[in-house]
Image: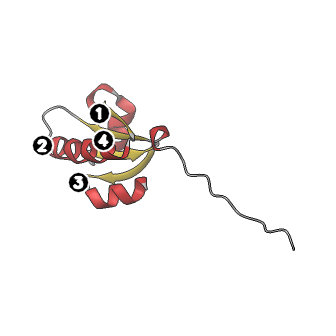
Amino acid sequence: MGAVSLLRRDKKNPADTVVTLIGKPGCHLCEDAREVILKVVGELGVGFEEKDILQDAALYGQYAEQIPVTLIDGRQHDFWRVDEQRLRKALA
């Protein structure tokens, strides 16, 4: 009987993933995005952090016209609106 090689794909632990919301106080789109993100990360056990664009000149320079911006592990995923199904798929 010949040896069988099995390829194993290690799945990343959801707790090692971080979704970042970049926004600012008083932004209604940011509030909408936060609601969707918190729902999804809560169900999937994914980390969450929020950054205020007004407190970071580099973020302001990069994303001022796009907030809210959603990052997954530091890479831009979305801006303006967060689609729940698209976010779930990206985190799966």
Residue 81 disc label = 3
Q: Amino acid at mark 1?
A: Ile
Q: Quadrant of residue 19?
A: top left
Q: Nearer the viewer, mark 4 or mark 2?
A: 4
Residue 53 disc label = 1
Closer to us: 41 or 77? 41
Binning the other alpha carbons within 10 Å of mark 4 as few (below 14), some (14 to 19) or many (20 upward) gives: few
- Give the residue displayed 34% in from the left and 55% down from the top: 87
Q: Amino acid at mark 4?
A: Gly
Q: Report the residue marked by disc 4.
A: 42
Question: Which corner quadrant holds the N terminus?
Answer: bottom right
Q: Earlier in the sequence, mark 4 or mark 2?
A: 2
- Give the residue displayed 87% in from the left and 73% down from the top: 2
Binning the other alpha carbons within 10 Å of mark 2 as few (below 14), some (14 to 19) or many (20 upward) gives: few
Q: Amino acid at mark 3?
A: Arg
Q: Amino acid at mark 2?
A: His
Q: CA distance from mark 2 to mark 3?
A: 11 Å
Q: CA distance from mark 1 to mark 2?
A: 14 Å
